[in-house]
Image (cartoon, helix red, strand yellow):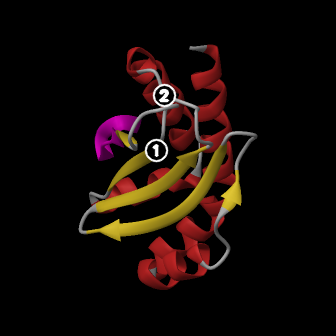
Amino acid sequence: MQKIVKVVMAVVIAMVVVSSVQMFFMKKQNKIPNTIYALNSTLPKKVDEITTFTKIELDGKILRFHYVLTPGEVIDPDGLAEVRAQAVKGICASEVKEVFDDGISIELLYAFQPKGDTDKKVSISILPDSCK
């Protein structure tokens, strides 16, 4: 559980640092696709020792951040509520939350491969009313 929270905090911090200023300006200038393209050109980026930020995309009204964990690392489903709470806290403390004004949700998508198992994905959705 502690490792999960640590990973998410690193991811949220990286997400906020990398994109908060850019997200603020893209929203104000209505240039979301151009900013996403610019951000993607800087990826992949290591967030911490086991997490890599690989892609950002806008799919309708969902701003999706893609992450990949080092093979063998896992996200415990029992810890997802805490992971989501920490992610909401980080997003709501940053300018990234301004995308919520346009009804855009944020999704954090983690891909991982447990040892000896097939690829798995876990997503965490953060809805526009999460910071109220």
Which amino acid type is shown beneath numbered disc 2?
Ile
State the residue at coordinates (62%, 42%).
Answer: 70
- Left or right: 18 with respect to 96? right
Q: Which quarter of the image is occupied by the N terminus?
A: top right
Crowd band around label 1 with a 10 angstrom C-alpha radius: few (<14), some (14–19), many (20+): many
Residue 127's quadrant in the figure?
top left
Q: Quadrant of residue 123?
A: top left
Q: Position of residue 76 (x, y in %)?
A: 45, 21
Do callouts 2 and 1 mark residues in contact (Cβ within 8 Å)? yes
| Residues packed near mark 2 inside 10 Å, few (<14), some (14 to 19) or many (20 plus) | many
Q: Amino acid at mark 1?
A: Tyr
75 magenta-colored = no
Answer with mark 2 or mark 1, whichever residue precedes in sequence.
2
The stretch of residues the image draws in magenta is 125-131
Rendered location of residue 49, percent (x, y): 75, 40
User: Where is mark 2, residue-wise?
Assistant: 75
Q: Residue at x 53, y 79 (%)?
A: 35
Q: Which mark is residue 110?
A: 1
Count numbered badges in the picture: 2
Q: Residue at x 64, y 65 (%)?
A: 44
Residue 43, disc: none
> Which structural element holds mark 1?
strand
